[in-house]
Amino acid sequence: MRGQFPVEKFKDIKTPFYYYDVELLQKTLDVVKMETEKYPNFYVHYAIKANANPILLDIINRNGLGADCVSGGEINAAIKAGFPSEKIVFAGVGKSDQEINLSLDHDIFCFNVESIPELEVINELAAAKNKVAKVCFRINPNVGAHTHANITTGLAENKFGIAMEDMEFVVSKAAEMKNVDFIGLHFHIGSQILEMDDFIALCKRINELQNRLEAEGITVKHINVGGGLGIDYSKPNENPIPNFTDYFKTYSENLILRKDQCLHFELGRAIVGQCGSLITKTLYIKKGIQKQFCIVDAGMTELIRPALYGAFHLVENISSNEPNEIYDVVGPICESSDVFVKDFELNQCHRGDYMAIRSAGAYGETMASSYNCRELPKGYSSEDFKK
Ligand code: LLP
């Protein structure tokens, strides 16, 4: 055992692979439960896009969370893992007819609708099945977030949601339709957000919008504020569990809820991010003129976040205790951006050493690709190594 990793048991397993610390996941879920129990009208849906590995879905479902899905595939994954359909929400700017029909067949809790054309199609498909689809409108609140530009979603320039100016019109449209039931408002401003002020800005905007609707005599039963709480990528050992206390408290103190109104959250990264590590084996140490490269067998195909967003993931040599040296840790893919970290201190590396690329539980395995005809990585539970 090196730190938290049973390295000696890794030798029979094909690298690279994802290692999920299910004890940490459970502890994280315990904190989510403890914090949300303070507010009886708060409901958390797990954003399946962050990680759809059945090992994790099973644990998350058993802990009572709902599921936030963005495709028919995710709805099927949620159902297969046992999530009750009345706890499934379905978001996404481009829902296909097939996906809408699948959701109608399962009588999911709610569609988060992003445009009038989509609302019309849902109404039509629901009518054909003699059903009434519950819908929330995803409103684009035009609130920025202090995070990477590619993962902000709540600005007017982003493709998501219905413009605030159109909210009343959309609501009146829904009222004319027989096969949709307008039950709430949905928002999401971005991901990997660590500044509570960003969530406060969203709360203020929702308060304004609720007042506007109330002036028209409309109150909704559900408010869904999306996900977005970030994790500490630089210190996963010191901060394995995100600050859920402040997160839920921020909403409780700043969002003015109406009587009997339910507040929904769609958290992905904060739930699963820290429990996953990508385990990779060192293939070669290559000494360049100014650099020393540690070439590992994982690449951007298994974890694309560094290449795509310039994201930092801590790398640890879990096979060596030797003095530190400086390396660029790179993958085998034929792309210059296939780099995990540059000029990074690691215990001296050798061929065959295992590396753990940390905080990779969210948007790691789900974003893996088979570029260069590579095999998709497998994910293992930490429990598998205790047998
Ligand atoms: N709800 C909606 C409507 C979303 O669009 C998202 C994420 C979530 C919930 C969950 O957000 P979270 O709690 O995980 O921040 N691939 C990127 C992240 C993309 C997030 C997209 N939407 C990354 O690797 O950073």
Image (cartoon, rainbow, N blue to C red):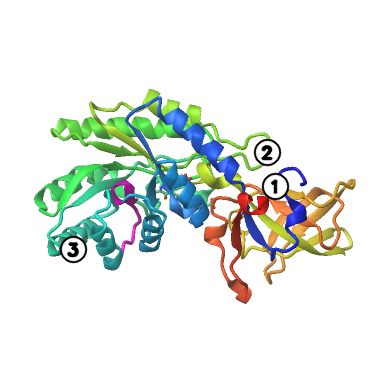
- Residue that carries the numbered disc 1 in the rendered image: 314
Contact between marks 1 and 2 (CB within 8 A): the answer is yes
- Residue 376 image offset from top left, x and y in percent: 58, 68
- Residue 264 image offset from top left, x and y in percent: 35, 38
Question: How would you rate the neighbour count of disc 3 (Cα within 10 Å): few for under 14, some for 14-19, many for 20 or more?
Answer: many
Residue at 61%, 50% (x, y): give it. 383
Amino acid at pointer 2:
Lys
Query: Of the residues under marks 3 and 1, which one precedes in the sequence?
Result: 3
Picture quarter containing residue 80? bottom left
Question: How would you rate the neighbour count of disc 2 (Cα within 10 Å): few for under 14, some for 14-19, many for 20 or more?
Answer: some
- Residue 184 image offset from top left, x and y in percent: 25, 41
Residue 235, numbered circle:
2
The residue nearer to you, when weighing 347 against 292, is 347
Q: Is residue 2 visible?
A: yes
265 sits to left or right of 10: left
The vertical placement of 282 against 164, above or below, is: below
CA distance for labels 3 and 1:
47 Å
- Residue that carries the numbered disc 3 in the rendered image: 125
Question: How would you rate the neighbour count of disc 1 (Cα within 10 Å): few for under 14, some for 14-19, many for 20 or more?
Answer: some
- Residue 3 image offset from top left, x and y in percent: 75, 43
Amino acid at pointer 1:
Leu
> Is 89 contained in the magenta span?
yes
Classify mark 2: helix, strand or loop: loop
The residue nearer to you, when weighing 106 against 185, is 106
Question: Residues in magenta?
Answer: 85-95
CA distance for labels 3 and 2:
48 Å
17 sits to left or right of 266: right
> Is 114 contained in the magenta span?
no
Classify mark 1: helix, strand or loop: loop
